[in-house]
Image: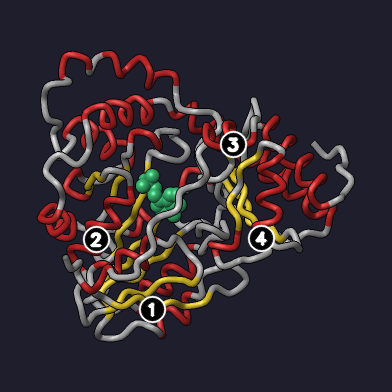
Amino acid sequence: MKPKAAIRGLPVYQPGKPLEEVKRELGLKEVIKLASNENPFGCSPAVWESLAAEREFFAMYPEGTAPDLRRELARHLGVDEARLIFGNGSDEVVQMLARAYLEPGCESVMADRTFPRYETLTRMEGATPVEVPLVDGTHDLEAMASAVNERTRIVWICNPNNPTGTIVARDALVRFLDRMPEHVLVVVDEAYYEYVTDPAYPDTVSLLDRYPQLFILRTFSKIYGLAAFRIGYGIGHPDVVTELNRVREPFNVNRLAQRAARAALADQAFVERCRRLNREGVETISRQLHEWGLHHFPSHGNFVLLDTGKPADEVFQSLLKQGIIVRSGEALGYPTYIRVTVGSPEQNARFLDALAVCLGRQRNEVR
Ligand SMILES: Cc1ncc(COP(=O)(O)O)c(C=O)c1O
């Protein structure tokens, strides 16, 4: 058997360590997973109730176009319904973009380091990834614009960037879009959009009319707390949406996910509360790191990438033994850093206590 050349040697995705496995392996009763940027507060209670209504439809295929959710989301965003496409997670929309726009001989431009799926999916289509180093953990849009040529089909901008958490400001994004030739699709991945409180952060939806090449990715996996359901979406020009629909699996977003997303969307008070608690958590963690003199990137998402000053895998193991799962920076291109998801106030305190133990530091009371 002979798999296609483009996928030879591609890495298999390594998920964060599962909770149950860690508990079993280390004989721990309580383990906190702060590795995958999930919502520590779960999802809106309205989601649980909404799911019962789906019981009578289990034997039926879902509507791939998600008509009810489409209508409600279009109203929420203030966009035309024809601008929306849904995916089995925003991951699947990334896949559809690569499938529809990339082929051998063409390129896609992305930051180095950023969300790894852009690179993997580019390679899967036989296209060439062009990686432009971050500057201070932030996208270098000038250098990225210079990397664009006649072979470029997509530029990926992860905003806030995973794993650094930094943002691209509105002015810089607009300057970049003004420089883009017509044949380039600019994908702005806003998986952590709802967490951002900085006024410099762009309102990309308001830019859609001006820039037909702009395509926005968002998800219900993060602040809405629905990662298990796998539902995300794209917002862009209706012509781009039409191309994506050509490569979309017919029943790609299941009924439960659509129903859950509608209920979650309707509960904006829950979103507001999570945004506030997350910001307080980022501040608590950042203050302590500052006291310890540990470098960390200014995070606008629900995670912090911090320099432990030690080999990341060692710190990862030491935290694991104390019942805390984080992401080692080793695989993220930051060998002495760890990426920690901002948890509940109690989880953040436990994380900082555990980090103090493994770095031999005193924990102050800046809680
Ligand atoms: C930047 C970014 N984009 C996309 C995703 C994928 O999210 P989902 O497929 O759950 O919508 C993630 C998940 O961690 C992410 O960090």
Discs 2/3, front:
3
Q: Earlier in the sequence, mark 2 or mark 4?
A: 2
The image quarter containing residue 227 is: top left
Distance from Cα at disc 2 to Cα at disc 1: 16 Å
| 257 sits to left or right of 26 | left
Q: Which part of the image, by quadrant, shows the N terminus?
A: bottom left
Does ligand 1 reach within 8 Å of label 3's beta carbon?
A: no
Name the secondary structure under disc 2: helix
| 7 sits to left or right of 193 | left
The image quarter containing residue 331 is: bottom right
Name the secondary structure under disc 3: helix
Q: Residue at x 61, y 53 (%)?
A: 339
Q: Amino acid at mark 3?
A: Glu
Q: Earlier in the sequence, mark 4 or mark 3?
A: 3
Give the number of the disc on residue 306. Answer: none
Distance from Cα at disc 1 to Cα at disc 4: 24 Å
Distance from Cα at disc 4 to Cα at disc 3: 24 Å
Residue identifier under label 4 = 337
Q: Amino acid at mark 1?
A: Val
From this viewpoint, is residue 268 visible?
Answer: yes
Q: Earlier in the sequence, mark 2 or mark 3?
A: 3
Label 1: few (<14), some (14–19) or many (≥20) C-alpha neighbours in 10 Å: some
Residue identifier under label 1 = 130
Residue 256 place in picture, x, y as percent: 26, 27
Label 4: few (<14), some (14–19) or many (≥20) C-alpha neighbours in 10 Å: many
| 207 sits to left or right of 344 | left
Up the image or down, 247 lies above or below 173; here it is above
Residue identifier under label 3 = 25
